[in-house]
Image (cartoon, rainbow, N blue to C red):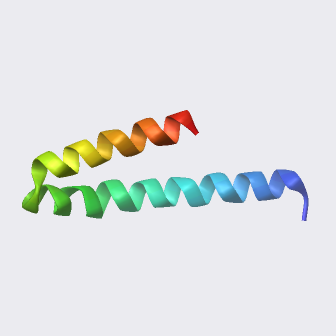
Amino acid sequence: ISSEFVSIAMALAAGAMIYIVSDELIPQSHEYHSHAANLGLVAGFVLGYML
């Protein structure tokens, strides 16, 4: 398997995970604990950006 194929497959998998999180998990978390959900979401994005 070429490294280019692996890179494309990983990008598609990451996109699918971002879609699932933004479509299902984020709205569901806001129903119960909106402040904690917002803080966790921002912290996760910042941590992901730093990595």
Report the residue at 30% width, 58% height from top.
23
Report the residue at 90% width, 65% height from top.
1
Residue 34, compared with residue 29, is above or below; it is above
Q: Residue furthest right?
A: 2
x and y, in percent, of residue 2 in the image: 90, 58
Residue 35, compared with residue 46, is above or below; it is below
Image quadrant of residue 46?
top left
Taking the image as shown, residue 31 lies to the left or right of residue 24, namely left
x and y, in percent, of residue 36 in the image: 17, 50
- Front residue of 34/21: it is 34
The C terminus is located in which quarter?
top right
x and y, in percent, of residue 34 in the image: 11, 50
Q: How many marks?
A: 0
- Front residue of 3/46: it is 46
Image quadrant of residue 38?
top left
- Front residue of 33/3: it is 33
x and y, in percent, of residue 29 in the image: 19, 60
Report the residue at 56% width, 55% height from top.
14
Report the residue at 14% width, 55% height from top.
30
